[in-house]
């Protein structure tokens, strides 16, 4: 298998469980690219859709819990984007908009915001609140262009990231921004396998593709974007004590190593559309 980011040959690294609704589990292979530090889980799109529709973060009963856990984090992401946008934030597209919490906040900031959400329950929930939510990216009118497009924990679902980024590029206005939040857990997966001799799938969550700082940079810069900021500090998240401690330790390590060691579990990336075509 070739790496979907850099094209180098990948190695079969391990087997891992993939979760579906009603307790159906099955084992799928993880491939690893040494060149750009990326894991790819070999799972078909139907299983991914099925999983998205049954995941805890698309269940209506969890709406309030996720609102409380993430609203300050969304505000933090907005504050980062704002620094780079100047006055150009008339409209915004949130890819993977879930319950519509980010859209709700951005609308209050007078930004005309729309979303894309494949999971039916949360999509209908957000629509019932008056939000404009497309079911798929192809449903967005082709003449629509956005100042900002955000993918908060949603890039990892896509099994064709190059095609996705190119499509987003065509939907971004000139000098428009793309903001991503991704997990940064590949080092945990490798540590688990090599040192602890354990299964790696829990470390990688439900990611179809698990990125590193290097691979997300390659993905964006090879497809028309220029990285303007990468944040390792993730403010505003409501986390369990153990996870919080983990964030603190890895953040201290990151600063002590002058940014050379990035073990923080998540990254926020802001990129600017830097060319007119890819
Ligand atoms: Zn690669």
Image (tube, rainbow, N blue to C red):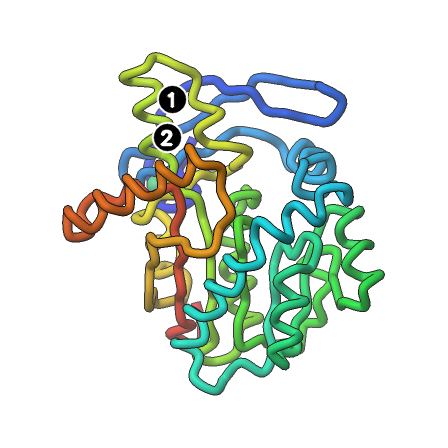
The residue at the point 50 percent across, 84 percent down is: 88
First of labels 2, 1 by sequence position: 1
Q: Residue furthest bottom?
A: 87
Percent of width and height locating residue 174: 47, 80
Percent of width and height locating residue 25: 65, 18
The residue tagged 2 is 32
Mark 1, secondary structure of its residue: strand
Mark 2, secondary structure of its residue: strand
Q: Quadrant of the N terminus?
A: top left
Q: Is residue 96 above or below residue 170?
A: above
The residue at the point 71 percent across, 71 percent down is: 141
Between 154 and 68, the one nearer to me in the picture: 68
Q: Residues within 10 Å of mark 1 (few under 14, many from 20)?
A: some
Percent of width and height locating residue 20: 68, 26
The residue tagged 1 is 13
The residue at the point 15 percent across, 52 percent down is: 258
Does mark 1 have its CB less than 8 Å from ligand 1?
no
Q: Is residue 199 above or below residue 108?
A: above
Between the C-alphas of marks 2 and 1, the distance is 6 Å
Location of ligand 1 given as a quarter of the image: top left
Residue 35 found in image quarter = top left
Q: Residue furthest front?
A: 241
Residue 83 found in image quarter = bottom left
Between 209 and 204, the one nearer to me in the picture: 204
Percent of width and height locating residue 34: 28, 34
Q: Is residue 71 above or below residue 253?
A: below
The answer to whether the residues at label 2 and label 1 have Cβ atoms under 8 Å apart is yes
Q: Report whether 165 appears left or right of 24.
A: left
């Amino acid at each position: 298998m070739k790496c979907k980011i850099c094209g180098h040959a990948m190695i079969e690294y391990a087997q891992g469980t993939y979760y579906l609704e009603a307790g159906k589990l099955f084992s799928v292979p993880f491939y690893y690219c040494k060149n750009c530090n990326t894991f790819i889980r070999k799972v078909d799109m139907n299983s991914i859709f099925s999983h998205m529709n049954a995941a805890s973060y698309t269940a209506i009963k969890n709406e309030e819990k996720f609102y409380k856990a993430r609203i300050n984090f969304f505000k933090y992401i907005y504050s980062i984007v704002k620094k780079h946008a100047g006055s150009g934030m008339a409209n915004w597209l949130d890819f993977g908009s879930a319950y519509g919490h980010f859209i709700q906040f951005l609308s209050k900031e007078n930004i005309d915001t729309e979303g894309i959400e494949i999971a039916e329950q949360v999509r209908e929930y957000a629509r019932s609140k008056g939000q404009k939510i497309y079911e798929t990216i192809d449903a967005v009118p082709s003449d629509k262009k956005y100042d900002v497009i955000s993918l908060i924990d949603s890039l990892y679902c896509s099994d064709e990231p190059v095609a996705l980024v190119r499509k987003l590029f065509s939907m971004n206005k000139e000098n428009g921004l793309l903001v991503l939040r991704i997990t940064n857990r590949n080092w945990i997966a490798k540590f688990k396998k090599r040192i602890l001799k354990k299964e790696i799938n829990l470390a990688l969550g439900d990611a179809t593709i698990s990125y590193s700082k290097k691979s997300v940079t390659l993905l964006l810069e090879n497809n028309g974007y220029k990285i303007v900021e990468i944040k390792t500090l993730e403010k505003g998240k409501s986390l369990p004590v153990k996870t919080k401690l983990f964030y603190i330790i890895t953040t201290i390590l990151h600063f002590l190593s002058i940014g050379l060691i990035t073990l923080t579990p998540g990254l926020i990336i802001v990129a600017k559309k830097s060319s007119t075509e890819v």
